[in-house]
């Protein structure tokens, strides 16, 4: 647990999951603006995501970190250690799945603090590389991740196939 700018970073608890789902839904709504087809979610998505988060709480190689301010939980980060193909010398990498901060609480250091805690967690496990996906159309995310030292390496591209 760490505190920066009156924001406390700690591991998520079961009681936090409903709030994390609310933040995740806001993240998905934001992403719909980048591609309404690929980010459209199913009706059951909130309960499915909550169940997935619940399973991650018990996985030793997963991290769910929350940022708490005076208002309560204002953000979270979901990350996990993952394996690359056995042909590479760098096999284990840290994978950041989700990072979201309540729009009303941004620019206060919560995202930076969440990332720093995740990075330290990966380093403690001997992980030397971290990967993250973000849309280049998401200017805020692009600026944030570049400021953390990330540089694009691969491009993930999609093709919609007509039936």
Image (cartoon, rainbow, N blue to C red):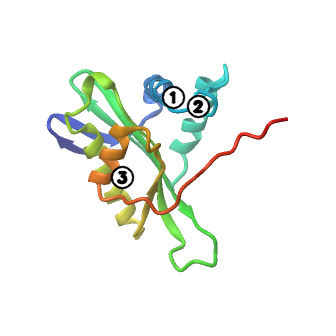
Q: Residue at x 59, y 41 (%)?
A: 55
Mark 2 to mark 3 CA distance (whole Å): 25 Å
The mark closer to the camera, 2 or 3, is: 2
Answer with mark 2 or mark 3, whichever residue precedes in sequence.
Answer: 2
Q: Residue at x 63, y 79 (%)?
A: 87
| Element type where label 1 sits in the image | helix
User: Residue 84: which numbered mark, if any?
Assistant: none
Q: Is residue 71 left or right of residue 55?
A: left
* Residue for badge 2: 39
| Picture coordinates of residue 56, whole percent (x, y) | 54, 44
| Element type where label 3 sits in the image | helix
| Element type where label 2 sits in the image | loop
Answer with mark 1 or mark 3, whichever residue precedes in sequence.
Answer: 1
User: Residue 28: which numbered mark, if any?
Assistant: 1
Q: In which quadrant is the C terminus drawn?
A: top right
| Picture coordinates of residue 97, whole percent (x, y) | 49, 46
User: Residue 118: which numbered mark, if any?
Assistant: 3
Q: Residue at x 14, y 37 (%)?
A: 5
Q: Is residue 119 left or right of residue 136?
A: left
């Amino acid at each position: 647990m760490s505190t920066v700018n009156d924001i406390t970073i700690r591991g998520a608890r079961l009681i936090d999951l409903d709030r994390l789902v609310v933040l995740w839904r806001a993240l998905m709504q934001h992403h719909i603006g980048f591609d309404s087809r690929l980010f459209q979610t199913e009706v059951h998505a909130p309960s499915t995501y909550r169940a997935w988060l619940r399973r991650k709480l018990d996985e030793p190689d997963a991290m769910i970190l929350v940022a708490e301010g005076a208002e309560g939980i204002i953000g979270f980060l979901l990350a996990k250690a993952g394996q690359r193909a056995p042909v590479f010398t760098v096999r284990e990498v840290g994978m950041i799945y989700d990072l979201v901060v309540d729009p009303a609480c941004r620019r206060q250091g919560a995202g930076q603090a969440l990332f720093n805690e995740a990075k330290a967690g990966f380093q403690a496990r001997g992980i030397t590389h971290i990967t993250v996906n973000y849309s280049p159309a998401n200017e805020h995310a692009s600026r944030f991740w570049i400021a953390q030292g990330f540089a694009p390496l691969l491009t993930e591209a999609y093709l919609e196939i007509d039936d």
